[in-house]
Amino acid sequence: MDAYRKAREWMDEAIALIKPGVATDKIARAFPKAQQIGFDSEMAAFGLNFCHGIGLGLHERPIISRLNSFTDPMEIEAGMLFAVETYCPATDGISAARIEEEVIVTPSGAQVITLFPADELPIANRY
């Protein structure tokens, strides 16, 4: 549950930053450094905490991550569609939380369009 809450926190911070005119490097700062989630490098952690455009292909530009956004930032534009993905390891050393939301960039910011938003972790059988 704690890992899910932390992954959701990172997700909400990133979504709040997605607005027209904002550069991708600013959004990438909302994600944890690779070492914070148990990886040696941003390359090793790539794809765990990031955003990617969705269009004709599943993973399209711009890609927003700590690996590439600081050196090659792009400006967000209204009409862009993104998947926002976060990952947080649990303290038990085995489990982890993984969340994904889809957002469309409107003139006033990001709007979540996921059919079943992941605001809370649904648990059918607590143990």
Image (cartoon, rainbow, N blue to C red):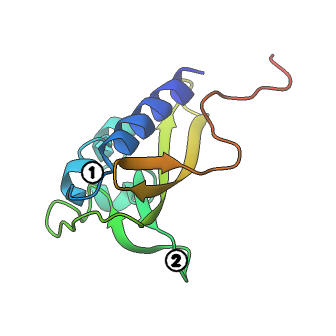
Q: Which residue reaches farthest right?
A: 125
In this rendering, position of residue 110 left or right of residue 65: right
Asked which quadrant contains residue 31, the reply is top left
Q: Which residue reaches farthest bottom?
A: 56
Q: Is residue 59 above or below residue 105?
A: below
Judging from the image, what secondary structure is the residue with disc 1 in? Answer: helix
In this rendering, position of residue 88 left or right of residue 41: right
* Residue at point 57%, 43% (across, down): 99
Judging from the image, what secondary structure is the residue with disc 2 in? Answer: loop
Q: Position of residue 77 (x, y in %)?
A: 30, 65
Q: Position of residue 80 (x, y in %)?
A: 41, 67
Q: Which residue is mark 2?
A: 55
Q: Position of residue 124 (x, y in %)?
A: 85, 26
Q: Which residue is mark 1?
A: 28
Specify the amino acid type for callout 1: Ala
Q: Is residue 48 above or below residue 55?
A: above
Asked which quadrant contains residue 66, the reply is bottom left
* Dot 1 alpha-carbon crowd within 10 angstroms: few under 14, some 14 to 19, many 20 or more: many
Q: Which residue reaches farthest left?
A: 71
* Residue at point 42%, 49% (across, down): 110
Q: Are marks 1 and 2 in contact (CB under 8 Å)?
A: no
Specify the amino acid type for callout 2: Gly
* Residue at point 56%, 49% (across, down): 101
Q: Is residue 64 above or below residue 123?
A: below
User: Which residue occupies the foreground of this view, 7 or 57?
Assistant: 57
Q: Is residue 91 above or below residue 112?
A: above
Task: Say which mark, if any, is on residue 124.
Answer: none
Q: Earlier in the sequence, mark 1 or mark 2?
A: 1
For the residues marked 1 and 2, what is the alpha-carbon distance in whole angstroms?
A: 21 Å
* Dot 2 alpha-carbon crowd within 10 angstroms: few under 14, some 14 to 19, many 20 or more: few
Q: Position of residue 55 (x, y in %)?
A: 52, 77
* Residue at point 63%, 37% (across, down): 118
